[in-house]
Image (cartoon, rainbow, N blue to C red):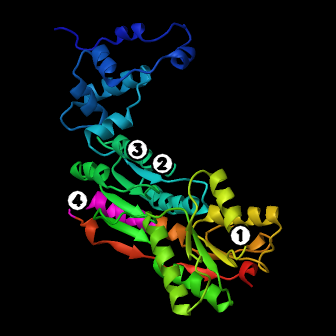
Amino acid sequence: MRNRFRPQAAKTIVHGSKNPGQRRERMKKVNIRELAQVLNISVATVSKALRDSHEISAETKKKVVEMAALLNYTPNPHASSLRKKNSKTIGVILPKVADNFFSLAINGIQSIAESKGYHLLIYLSHDKFINEKLIVADCGSGRVDGILISISGDTETAEHLRQLNEENIPIVFFDRDFDGFDTARVITNDRECGYMAGKHLVEKGMQRPVFLSISSSLPICKERAEGFEQAIRESGIVASPAYQPVLYCEGSDEAIFEQIKTIISQQDGPDAVVASVEKIALQVYMACQELGIHIPAALKVIAFSTLETAPILNPSLTTITQPAFEIGKTAAEILFKGIEKKNFDLKGEKIILPSRLIERASTQ
């Protein structure tokens, strides 16, 4: 009877040393196909034997396991997950990481992913739609089991996300969402917070407060700006005809810095500003230092920010602080419902976690 097992073939894989310990150290790893060739059995038989399948005899299992150890075989978890259509990975698409909000949100996401035995694959769009579109395309075909996304500043269509829907890959928005795509979202009360910021400045007696926005299309910026404008309208402020409550600072960081300097240095310029995002606030501080404008005596400042150093800035910064960790954590919890429960309807999920105004010296 022909011997089905040929362990001597291992000599073609093992690189020579008469010392077994040294031989094992120098041995190259083999894949499952090579292991099957050495044993002269099918790949399917090897796979079942390594999984301790009841279909394979104890003798065959023993020989497969011994040969796998001898040849330094290790399973490829990625290949296995693709076959099962389960990558044990979720994709997280961010516009940037410089903002402290997103680092805290990632911690919240990670706390849930780890408990589920999942890894995070983090992508940066750098606030550009073209990058976001390429990233979403890369996430298809089983690469990830679900997507958490905070959209870029110039995203104006959701067609790229619909392809993932067709592949049954669940998607959840967090912080920055898109109105034209119906799925779960975890956000904060942006309009109410914009109103809160405007009312706070009006109550401080400000006559020319402005909202500095980084985008005219990004939903969170629009919501915050509209809430701010409502507070200004209700206040009955009568400013000069040139007064505009919402101004846009767009482009590179250098361009935004120059725009801010121009805005705050103008005659009859603003007596207070609300920064729509964290980086705007820091640039306002730097511009004021360069121009010799005193905060808060000449200019009061509020920022939408989770900046941990806000209390120790000079002066300390008044903030609208978002629950970043909770937003990330909650978004991940909802995503895993979509991954684990195939009939779970993500479209019905909209969670709003409120932010809060923390007054500090920059508006006192």
Q: Which residue is mark 2?
A: 125
Of badges 1 and 4, nearer the viewer stands 1
Give the overall secondary structure of the magenta segment: helix
State yes or no: discs 3 and 4 in contact (Cβ < 8 Å).
no
Of labels 3 and 1, the one closer to you: 1
Reply above or below: 285 against 272.
above
- Image position, residue 168 (x, y; %): 24, 52
Label 4, on which residue? 342
Mark 1–mark 4 Cα distance, whole angstroms, equals 57 Å
Please report whichever mark, 2 or 1, sits nearer to the chain's N-terminal start.
2
Sequence-earlier tag: 1 or 4? 1
Which residue type carries mark 2? Answer: Ser
Q: Which residue is mark 1?
A: 266
Kind of element beneath mark 1: loop
Please state which amino acid type lies under the numbered disc 1.
Answer: Gln
In the picture of the structure, the residue carrying the numbered disc 3 is 135
